[in-house]
Image (cartoon, helix red, strand yellow):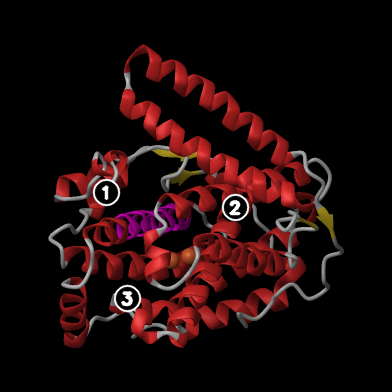
């Protein structure tokens, strides 16, 4: 393990809680928004598709999915004995950041449900909060196997909240739900082909799990398509920004903890580009632009962001005046790289008449 990783080791429940509360560009955040504006959402333009989606939520085909049986714990214990310490740290890091981001969705959707009267929005937010609370609880049980369960009530009270205007919530949450689907389904398919590489039972839950995330994404797609001004003009610049921010964050994070993917027989770079392809294909339902992720300059830019973030970690560990100067220089270089990626030409396409797509990957 490198010195940099060692300083962030999750080896106690206090360390796990500190990790969940950490505020960096790469860690999941908690959000709050303008509830009065959320109350004014009007889905009448896409009513038929909306009602079909709401009856899927009501049908709740995953109501019995997120239960652990005795075999789960047994399988987890047997598998853990074979892990290297590095894999264990990366897996714990994955569990803590996943529980934080699932719970972040749960808190946001719950708060919106509580603060609005609009029956469409209220019902949707309640269903999504129900799903995310199951997801967070399920991951937290796996953390408890290590004695590292998070106190979600405490996290809710003490983690910092970031204010996002509703449209930023729509762009960012839509993308994070869809990319969440793409990540989980890619892992699930890989382990379906190679069950011998499934190093923890939680991955067997991913297929039905990511269908929840897919549907959450569909909800935001419908909301945005019902308000077409969010998808044109100056807002396209915001869409570009969020696409790049979400893709770049994922790339840097996955390359910072490559062992998790390697243990599943996946190369982090090809995995990430496969996830981008799926997300880009899905997002054509709502975004009239997409990033040219196959462009060599795009790929080189993401790689540079990762190298800079590695050097940033080293500069932080070094500390002192030199360390601080290095950090400042690297921050400028990172911003310039991000700006160059942002200014690259994007692909444009017309939006389909029918908004919804099926989770067919
Ligand atoms: Fe979730
Ligand atoms: Fe979700």
Location of residue 152 by image quarter: bottom left
- Residue 121 painted magenta: no
Q: CA distance from mark 3 to mark 2?
A: 24 Å
Q: Which residue is mark 3?
A: 202
Q: Residue at x 41, y 66 (%)?
A: 262
Q: Tell which of 191 and 37 is nearer to you.
A: 191
- The answer to whether 190 is drawn above or below residue 346 in the figure is below
Q: What residue would you read off at disc 1? A: 1
Instruction: Classify mark 3: helix, strand or loop.
Output: helix
Q: Earlier in the sequence, mark 3 or mark 2?
A: 3
Q: Residues within 10 Å of mark 1 (few under 14, many from 20)?
A: few
> Which residues make up the magenta segment?
93-114
Indicate the secondary structure of the residue bearing disc 2.
Answer: helix
Sequence order check, earlier mark of 2 and 1: 1
Horizontal and vertical percent position of residue 143:
22, 63
In the image: residue 151, left or right of residue 191: left
Check the image and report above or below for 163 versus 228. Answer: above
Taking 324 as reference, is 4 left or right? Answer: left
Residue 289 location in percent, x, y? 79, 55
Residue drawn at point x = 27 percent, y = 39 percent: 3
Direction from residue 222 to residue 178 in the image, left or right: left
From the top left corner, tell me how far across and down residue 173 is, in percent.
56, 55
Residue picked out by circle 2: 247
Q: Is mark 1 within 8 Å of ligand 1?
A: no
Q: What whole-number distance in Å separates the C-alpha atoms at marks 2 and 1? A: 26 Å
């Amino acid at each position: 393990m490198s010195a940099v990783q060692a300083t962030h080791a999750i080896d106690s429940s206090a360390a796990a809680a500190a990790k969940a509360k950490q505020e960096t560009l790469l860690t999941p955040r908690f959000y709050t928004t303008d509830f009065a504006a959320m109350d004014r959402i009007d889905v009448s333009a896409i009513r038929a598709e909306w009602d079909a989606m709401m009856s899927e939520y009501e049908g709740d085909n995953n109501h019995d999915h997120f239960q652990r049986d005795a075999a789960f714990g047994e399988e987890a214990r047997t598998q853990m004995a074979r892990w290297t310490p590095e894999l264990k740290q990366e897996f714990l890091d994955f569990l803590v950041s996943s529980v934080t981001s699932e719970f972040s969705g749960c808190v946001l959707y719950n708060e919106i449900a509580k603060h609005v009267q609009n029956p469409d929005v209220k019902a949707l937010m309640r269903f999504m909060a129900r799903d995310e609370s199951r997801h967070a609880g399920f991951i937290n049980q796996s953390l408890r196997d290590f004695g590292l369960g998070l106190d979600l009530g405490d996290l809710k009270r003490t983690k910092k909240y970031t204010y996002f205007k509703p449209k930023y919530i729509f762009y960012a949450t839509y993308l994070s739900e869809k990319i969440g689907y793409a990540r989980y389904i890619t892992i699930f398919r890989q382990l379906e082909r190679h069950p011998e590489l499934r190093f923890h039972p939680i991955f067997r839950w991913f297929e039905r799990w990511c269908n929840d995330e897919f549907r959450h994404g569909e909800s935001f797609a419908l909301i945005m398509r019902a308000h077409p001004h969010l998808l044109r003009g100056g807002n396209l610049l915001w869409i570009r920004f969020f696409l790049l921010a979400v893709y770049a964050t994922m790339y840097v994070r996955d390359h910072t903890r490559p062992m998790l993917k390697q243990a599943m027989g996946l190369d982090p770079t090809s995995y990430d580009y496969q996830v981008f392809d799926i997300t880009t294909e899905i997002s054509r339902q709502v975004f009239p632009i997409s990033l040219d992720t196959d462009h060599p300059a795009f790929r080189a830019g993401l790689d540079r962001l990762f190298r800079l973030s590695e050097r940033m970690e080293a500069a932080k560990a070094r500390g002192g005046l030199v360390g601080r100067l290095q950090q400042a220089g690297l921050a400028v270089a990172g911003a310039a790289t991000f700006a160059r990626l942002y200014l690259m030409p994007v692909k444009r396409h017309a939006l389909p008449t029918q908004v919804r797509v099926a989770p067919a990957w």
